[in-house]
Amino acid sequence: MRFVAPSRESVDPDVFELPPLRDWMEFEALLCGSDWPDVAQLDALRAGVQRATRETLPRFTEQTPTLLRDGLHYESRIAQHGIVATRANNWHDLLNALIWLRHPALKNALNARQVEEIAKVGAKQRSRAQCALTHFDEAGIIARVNDPELMALWDAHDWHGLFWRERAAWSDGRIAVEVFGHALLEHALWPRQLLVGKALAVAMNDDEVSARLAIAIRTGELLNDPQELRPLPVSGIPGWHAHNGDESFYFEAPCFCPVRSGRLYPAPFPSPIAAS
């Protein structure tokens, strides 16, 4: 069933005080105001981000029938004309714009790779790489993990171990996540949703994670196949769901699926070989 976001006036204000949306409160006026920001307001924020990051951002332009008459693929329009077709009064596209404003290098890298793949397979087909790129763009999570034992629990889908027995790890710095996917943020607008993201695990603990991932994605080192991404039911993270203070949640909630037989995950980025 296709997800339908709540209307702006029906969103429970409490969702903006909970993760993951509370982590986007530098955009509080755009997210929490009673009225929709218009697309021109979003576009006006580009200049400051470009000065701060030295990354070129495409323009946020309202999606209209006239705009779409060019017949271009959404990603091709960004690459060729520097235009992100943005629907007015739309949560999905508003959140997408916010991701562009926070992570322009990553978004530019995803777009560059999408366009490369379109050139290979055409606009009406999707390669394995395009599926991986899209999954990360829509539902992506950047997970910093500094403990091999936690990775072993994650590899095995030992969700009780990862989220309950190792509950302290989520506050003591051994593991931390940032939601990157705008569709995942959109789902968080409904309280008590069971959220599962598509994660890239990274073995880095510095401020250059986003920039290094952007380079690796752009050069084809990452996101060539959806199997590179690992499911992470973020509703299990302490404080991310109203019911996860109860141990039984980790055995009963349908988001905690067992690992599929034979499923293997790549080592956290950068791999030991790449890092040496």
Image (cartoon, rainbow, N blue to C red):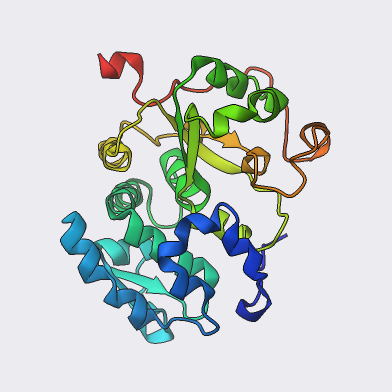
Q: Position of residue 8 (x, y in %)?
A: 60, 78
Q: Is residue 5 visible?
A: no
Name the residue nearer the viewer: 14 or 265.
14
Q: Position of residue 26 (x, y in %)?
A: 40, 63
Name the residue nearer the viewer: 132 or 193.
193
Residue at horizontal 31%, vertical 46%? Answer: 113
Q: Quadrant of the rendered structure where residue 259 is?
A: top right
Residue at horizontal 67%, vertical 38%? Answer: 236
Q: Is residue 129 left or right of residue 212?
A: right
- Against 95, is 150 above or below? above
Q: Work out which quarter of the rendered image holds the N terminus and state it.
A: bottom right
Q: Work out which quarter of the rendered image holds the C terminus and state it.
A: top left
- Against 29, is 73 above or below? above
Q: How many marks?
A: 0
- Against 96, is 217 above or below? above
Q: Quadrant of the rendered structure where residue 86 is?
A: bottom left
Q: Quadrant of the rendered structure where residue 6 is?
A: bottom right
Name the residue nearer the viewer: 17 or 117.
17
Q: Is residue 6 left or right of residue 93?
A: right
Q: Is residue 47 left or right of residue 15?
A: left
Residue at horizontal 36%, vertical 19%? Answer: 271
Q: Position of residue 34 (x, y in %)?
A: 55, 83
Q: Is residue 140 visible?
A: yes
